[in-house]
Image (tube, helix red, strand yellow):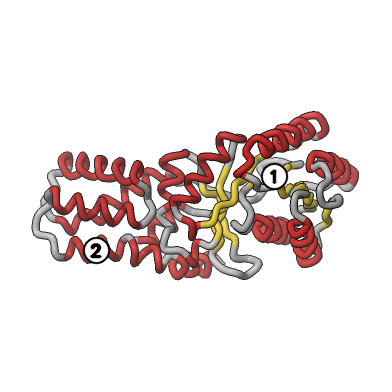
Amino acid sequence: MFKGFFDKLKNGLEKTKSNLTGKITDMLSGAVTIDDDLYDKLEEILITADIGVETTMYIIDRLKEKIKEEKIKDPNLLNGCLKEIIMDILGDEKNSIIPEKTPEIILVIGVNGVGKTTSIGKICYKLKNKGYKVIMAAADTFRAAAIDQLEVWSKRTGVEIVKHQEGSDPAAVIFDAIQASKARKADVLICDTAGRLHNKKNLMKELEKIDKVIKREYEEAFKQTLLVLDATTGQNAVQQAKEFTKVCPVDGIILTKLDGSAKGGIVISIKHSLNIPVKLVGIGEDIDDLQEFRSRDFVEALF
């Protein structure tokens, strides 16, 4: 299973790999000395691989320090240095979707179209397979389609859903879902929420109201907020993350569509510029293709 996942990750990162490490290797193979021209070319490759300007400058500065300290003269040794720097940025966190303690409540946030509902369905499937009792709450009442989609996943995974009519109060849905979770002794309650980032004021009010309900009704639950981002949107996803962190605290990122993207460099950008760990990555369409992110595997697959 683990080997299969590493292979999937490696295949999923093919586009990012050719856009990033492939171009770096090609550039280094023709380089004779480590000079400003080489740094400029490297900078351009990192930025176009969606690592972002801020993170790119940090990597280049660290690389210059390392080369000076270790008196490196051979350009071909730069790949190994880069690998170490990226590993340092990402850290070696062991991410798991298995609850730290139960009961747990997970708020899932993110703009429409990033794969939020699908991610919730896949998390439910994963937890149910591990023997946890899970309930999902359809608190994105702004769109009827969001409620319908979640209902499809409820049937597909055999996980109970708590829902109201379109346009009803999201906090009321969470209230009912909490009561249902307590009555049925659920281990995990996963809540979908609206992703209207263009109307931050409304979204902030909505999330504040939900938070109040959770604190009042489910004080004993361990709470975490996960933000879903689409890897194919590159730096736009990093911008979304910055905007969401202004609205509410984010504990971790779910990065979808990593397998279809040449912009996997945003994993590095997110961790460096926001210090939020990527907890789960989507590397395929199958129900079990949402996997815990392992930074060491990511870096190994990339290089």
Identified by mark 1, the residue type is Ile
- Identified at 39% across, 63% down, the residue is 16
For the residue pair 221 and 281, the one nearer the viewer reads as 281
Residue 100, located in which quarter of the rendered image?
top right
Q: Is residue 130 visible?
A: no
Task: Tell me which residue sits at (81%, 48%) in the image.
Answer: 167
Q: What is the quadrant of residue 203 in the picture?
A: top right
Q: Is residue 184 left or right of residue 243?
A: right
Residue 101 visible, this angle: yes
The residue at the far left in this view is 32
User: Which disc number belongs to residue 271?
Assistant: none
Q: Earlier in the sequence, mark 2 or mark 1?
A: 2
Which of the image's four quarters has the C terminus?
bottom left
Residue on which disc 1 sits: 106
Which residue: 78% across, 49% down? 141
Please rate how many residues cluster around mark 2, counting C-alpha atoms within 10 Å: few if below 14, some from 14 to 19, many from 20: some
Q: Secondary structure at mark 1?
A: strand
**x, y (%) of residue 201?**
65, 35
Mark 2 — residue?
Answer: 25
Total label count? 2
Amino acid type for the residue under numbered disc 2: Thr
For residue 213, side relative to residue 198 (left or right): right
Q: Position of residue 139 (x, y in %)?
A: 77, 47
The N terminus - image quarter: bottom right
Residue 65 on image: x %, y %: 21, 39
